[in-house]
Image (cartoon, grey):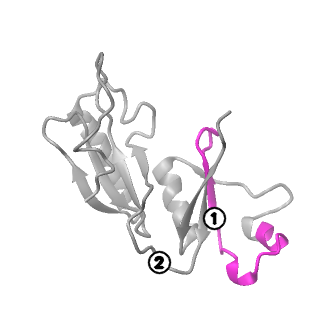
Amino acid sequence: MPATFQLVIDCRDPDALCRFWTVALGYVVATPPAGFESWPEFWVDFRLDAGELVDGDDRIVDPLGNGPQIWFQQVPEPKSVKNRLHLDIAASGAVPASGARTLPLADRRMLVEAKVEELVGLGAAVLHRHDVDGLDHYAVTMADPEGNEFCVRSRPRRTAGRRRLRGPGRCSRAR
C-alpha cells in the first residue's frame, strides 16, 4: 500500500501562502479538527508556545481528497537557496494537464500563460519560460510570494509509442 504524506513548506507567513496556494492549486483551507473553531485555537490546546502560534491559517487540502495536505510551517528565516523539490502545476487545473492532450501547443501555451498571469496577480514572479523549438512542451518556472520555485506547464500531445519528455525543455531545468 502506498504511503500517505503531507507536504510541508517552510515559510515566514503561512496565512499568506495558504491564500496564494489555494488559488494556484484549486485547494481549500483545511478545516480545524473537530471541537476547534480555528487552527490557532487547536495549536493553543496542543500547548504550542505562544511565539510559535500562526495568526491565521496554515494548511490547505485538496477538496476532492486526491492530493496531499500541505502545511505551511512558519520559520524565522527567509528562503535562501533554490528548492530541491518543486511543484508542477497543470495550467488548466485538470488532468490531463492543460486540457486534452490533443490540443495544439499554441492552445496549451495560452492556457499556461493565463494561469501565469493569474498567479503573477497574486504575487508570484516569472523566473524563466521554457520554450524550446521542436518540443511539444511549454512551461514557465515561477516563484511564489516567498520565493519558492514551482512550474506551470503543459504536456506534450500523446502519440503512439511516444515516451515521456526528457532532456532540454523539462520544467525542472530552471535557470
- Residue with the mark numbered 2: 78
Three-letter amino acid code at the position of disc 2: Pro
Taking depth in this image into account, of 36 and 6 the one nearest to the observer is 6
Taking depth in this image into account, of 174 and 41 the one nearest to the observer is 174
In the picture shown, does residue 134 fall above or below 124? Answer: above
Q: Which mark is residue 58?
A: 1
Tell whether position 109 is magenta: no
Q: Which picture quadrant has residue 71?
A: bottom right
Q: Which picture quadrant has residue 76?
A: bottom right
- Can you give x and y, in whole percent of width and height, for residue 95 in the image? 45, 32
**Nearer the observer, disc 1 or disc 2?**
2
- Local packing at callout 2 (Cα closer than 10 Å; few below 14, some 14-19, many 20+) is few
- Local packing at callout 1 (Cα closer than 10 Å; few below 14, some 14-19, many 20+) is many
- Can you give x and y, in whole percent of width and height, for residue 145 in the image? 42, 68
Q: Which residues are magenta?
A: 41-69
Q: Residue at x 45, y 55 (%)?
A: 85
In the picture shown, does residue 6 fall above or below 103? Answer: below
Of the image marks 1 and 2, the number of the one nearer the N terminus: 1
- Can you give x and y, in whole percent of width and height, for residue 175 in the image? 25, 60
Q: Secondary structure at mark 1?
A: loop
